[in-house]
Image (spheres, rainbow, N blue to C red):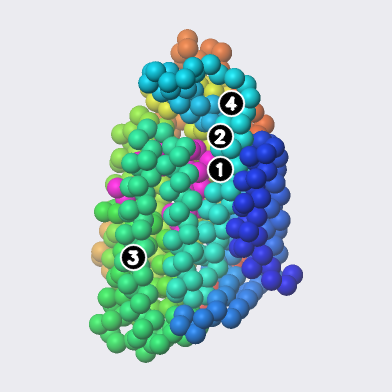
Amino acid sequence: MEYALLQAVFIPLLLSPVAYIIGRKMGPTPAMWFTFAILLYTTILVIQAALNGTTEEHYPWTEMFGEFGFLMDGLASPFAIIIYVLSTILVLYSKPYMIHKFHEQYEEEQKQIQSSGGQSAVVESTSLTKYVNAKSGLYFALYLVFAMGMLGTVLATNLIEFYIFFEVMLIPGFFLVAIWGDGPRRKIGLMFLFWTHAGAVVLLLGFLMIGLTIGSFDFADIQESAIPEDIVMLSAIAIAIGLGVKLAVFMFHIWLPYVHGSAPTPISALLSPAMIGIGAYGIFRLIVEFLPSTFAELSIWFHIWGLVTMIYGGAMALMQDDLKRLLAYSSISQMGYILFGIGSMSALGLAGAEMMYVTHALGKGILFMMAGIIIVKVGTRSITKLGGLAGKMPITAVCAVIGALTIMGVPPTSGFMGEWILFYGALETAIEEGSTVRAVTFGLGLVATALTMSYILWMLKRVFFGKTPEHLENVKEGSWYMTAPMMVLAGFTVVVGIYPDIFLKTIIPYMQGVLGV
């Protein structure tokens, strides 16, 4: 289809005001279905473009920055598909969760009015309806902009274009956390904005060093040989640090547990599986592909950095009582797996790293949705106050187990294929180079997988099994709006686990081409 990628990126942005108006005038249900229809249509466009092989679109922009374009190739397609599939599915999940959140906030505001001695806080159905409508319209409008920002970043063909979309993600993300988050949400929203914006500024410095040196910001014009050695190393380090903040790898991870713990659960289920992994996409595209010699020098450091992140995130997850913070630290650990695979300097290791983005998105998306259902139906996130929920919430429990198996890398889920290929590639490089350091990191990486299994199984046992506490006797299963999206992702992860070539047939040839294998 003509202008398919342009439509996929800009239709959600252009129609976001319409979603706001529909929500404000007609309520959350019409706004939800309108948003769902937009994202379903654009998701179909993305999948069609991916099935057609490499797709490029270029449009005139400004002489100062170069061309404005979109590229769908073997690297971008898995990222793009996962981002929009998750975004589409989570629209349905958003409705009951966010209505629950709107009601909570309405009651809080009424109490504040009452305690301040203001006008009567008698809750009238009309005023509550208007409140919910206004908030739902704003939520779905911001949601659409957030989704398009992620896709635009992945499809960009120009350094400045990449940076613009990279920053566009942050704006709706900040408002979604600051308006509807839990706890000190405004403070945490600002933390998210400052950390990720600081990383983006460092990233921009790396872009400027490259663009001003070669005289162009277009991806097609970037030649490592045209950049002085000292400049290319500095720019690569700046890009790695800027993207490392987005990835929330060790040292730059501080913001993530707070933001994922506070954000509305549908947004946590997008931030963790989809958004933070875009940092890995940037490393693939901007360092591995465009600066291969520099990447060869830095690869062992990526490898070690990934290993430390894997172990740190897993150890911290094992100590958490808050369900969403446990999943947040798990996401840090999983980003470590991706960085570990990138540093393997092997076509299979790199392919496994990108496959880990896909599997993490599926598995962690399920687990965050599980957490949201428990928050809505039980009213607590404390794991010590839960137990025996498998009998009360069987669909949620089964899907959560499938999501957990995906994160642990157990067949027949997609997680097994991702981890298998990743560690195969890491071992392959260690043997070929005869590197003791790489052999040790490979062994420690396997230890990290045992840590992953520990915190996931410990969480499942305490939440879903054992004796049901008295205060949970009347708990019921979540609505179909919440359980059906989980079931779709659970089915998807099993299908990809059985037939991984859905993604690998495009990923592996791309990685082989990048490394010249």
Q: CA distance from mark 3 to mark 1?
A: 27 Å
Q: Nearer the viewer, mark 2 or mark 1?
A: 1
Kindly identify which numbered label has been placed on residue 201: 3
309 up-or-down from 466: above or below? below
Quadrant occupied by the N terminus: bottom right
Mark 2 or 1, nearer chain start: 2
Instruction: Give SS at disc 1.
Output: helix
74 up-or-down from 35: above or below? below
Q: Determine which residue is flagged by label 1.
A: 139
Residue 274 is covered by the magenta coloring: yes
Q: Main secondary structure of the magenta part?
A: helix
Q: Looking at the image, which residue is at 59% across and 45% down?
A: 140
Mark 1 or 4, nearer chain start: 4
Image-based side of 159 in relation to 2, left or right: left
Q: Nearer the viewer, mark 1 or mark 4?
A: 4
Mark 3 or 1, nearer chain start: 1
Kindly identify which numbered label has been placed on residue 265: none
Q: Looking at the image, which residue is at 44% across and 61% down?
A: 167
Of residues 65 and 443, the one drawn nearer to the viewer in this rendering: 65
Kindly identify which numbered label has been placed on residue 128: 4
Q: Determine which residue is flagged by label 2.
A: 98
327 up-or-down from 101: above or below? below
Q: Which stretch did the figure color magenta?
A: 253-278
Q: CA distance from mark 1 to mark 4?
A: 16 Å
Q: Looking at the image, which residue is at 36% across and 63% down?
A: 200
Q: Position of residue 256 (x, y in %)?
A: 36, 46
Q: Quadrant of residue 475?
A: top right
